[in-house]
Structure formats: structure tokens, C-alpha cells
Image (cartoon, grey):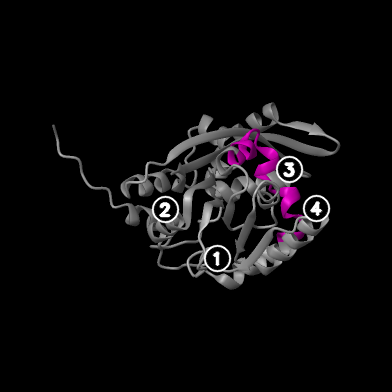
Amino acid sequence: MPELQTIQLNQLWEKEQGWNAKKKIGRKFEDRVELAFWKKIAPSYSEQYNLCRDVPGLMDQVLSIIKTGNDILEIGCGTGNFTIPMAKVSRHVMALDFSPAMLAQLHVVAAKEHIENIETVCSKWETYQGAGEADFVVSVNSLYRIYEIEDALKKINRYGKKGFVIIRSLIHPYFHKIYRSLGITFKHNNDYMLIPLFLWNMGIRAEVQYFYYTKHCYYSTQTEIESEMIRNLGELTYMNYKEKMWQQFEAEALYENGLYRYDCQRAVEMITFSR
């Protein structure tokens, strides 16, 4: 039997997340840019991006794992899409986020719901130094800016006395079905493959489950659609496949109430571990 080669997971993570790039520009690498982004989007975030609402069965599965009466530490709580439902069944939720604007919005939502068992902390997970442990640690799409991912995952495992839940959206362009059908190569993030491998390599027998849902994408003009395709593929590739892509888009999209609607098939990964 041939000898299996050791996979250098940290190197793969660096490459996949762009940490080995010569020029590191953008939200992932610049705190100032990241904070400005979340400040702008905070008031409308829950309406635009809400996996708890959009993915059938996802929140029910989270609640079945954390159960009732436990202490929860949530990494990257945002405006509270998952925080609020968890707080309703938990004894206490420590809600951690790097963005003051997102935490401020969470306070507004919690006040409207008359929820008083949420404590917020403005911090990155990498630098968080809280002394207390939690029964469960929950992370929803919050590990994408972390360089030392192995240390971050070890910290999650250490803080979660009873276990943890990590949720990660599979990041693909909205028109990925069209691109694939035409054999077009496009950029997408495979970090969802690496996180379970890191955990298994640590001897943590985490379970992996996938949830599938449809996201309705709306565009007011053909120029908006074209701009997204060019952003995904580059102008040269777009021009080479323009006619075929538009034929397929028009065959699959709907036009209603003055808007183009394209139904994109999306997937979410849930990684869980219970002691």
C-alpha cells in the first residue's frame, strides 16, 4: 500500500484565504475597511443576509444541539440573527463581534424582543481573553478573516465545555450554475473543506452536515447582471461567453414587478462536536 502524504493544512489555508498574496488589500486584511463595511450594512444586514430565516431546518438543528438552559459563546454574532433565537432557550449568551455598529444593532433588536440575557463584547476571536468558559461555542460565518485558523479552532474547542457549532456558507457566485454548465472556470472559496480537516487532524471527531436552500437574487437592470458576471469572471471571459450566458440566464430567470429574479442554489455547512 502506498504511503499517504502529509497534507500541509496551514499552507492550504493561507493560499485559499489569500494570506500568501504579495499585496493584501481589502476587508479581510484591513480592519479599517472591514469596520467601515459593517457600519454601512448593519441597519439592513438581517433583512438582506439571514441564514436563520432563509435556510430551512438550520436553526432547529442548532437549537437541538445547544439544548436549553446552557451558556453560549457566539463568535461573530452580527446583528443577532442566531443570537436572539439562542438567547430565548439559553441561560446566558456572550455575543462577540468586532464591529461596534453590528453590536449596536443587536442591542436594538434585543430590546424590542425584551431579551435581557445577552452580554456583548467588542473583540476579535483571536484576541478575546474572556476568563469564563461556555457550554457551547457557536460560530456563523465568522472565521474568514483569521490567519492562525488552527489556533482559533483549538480555542473554540477549549472554550466549549460541552461542544461547538461552526456554520459556514459555501461561497460561490450567484450564477455558478450557468458558469458550470458552460465549462467556465470561476473563483470560489474551498475553506469549508479545510475546517473539518483541521479538526479531524486535531483528533476532534466533528460531524459535518449540509443544508441546501434557494436564494432569490433580484436585479433592476441588465447592466447590474452584466457587472456581476464581469466581476466573477473578468471582462475577457465574459465577452467570450456573453451570448451563451445570457441565453441561459434568460431561460432560467423571471421578470416580475420590474425586476429580474434569478434563483440561486446555495449550500451551508454545519460542523458540530458534542462531548
Q: Residue at x 42, y 43 (%)?
A: 193
The disc, 1 or 4, on the residue closer to the chain's N-terminal end is 1
Residues under labels 1 and 3: Cα distance?
Answer: 27 Å
Q: Tell me residue 171's x, y (percent).
A: 54, 45
Of tags 1 and 3, the one toward the viewer is 1
Q: Assign the C terminus to one quadrant of the image.
A: top left
Q: Is residue 14 above or below residue 54?
A: below
Give the residue number, with chain letter if any, for mark 3: 222
Residue 115 in which image quadrant: bottom right
Q: Amino acid at mark 2?
A: Glu
Q: Nearer the viewer, residue 20 or 51?
A: 51
Secondary structure of residue under mark 4: loop
Amino acid type indicated by mark 1: Gly
Which of the numbered marks, if any, corresponds to residue 26?
Answer: 1
Q: Are marks 4 and 3 in contact (CB under 8 Å)?
A: no
Q: Earlier in the sequence, mark 4 or mark 2?
A: 2
* Residue situated furthest left in the rendering: 1
Amino acid carrying label 4: it is Glu
Q: Is residue 57 magenta?
A: yes
Mark sitting on residue 16? 2
- Name the foreground residue: 181 vs 238: 181
Discs 4, 2 touching: Cβ within 8 Å: no
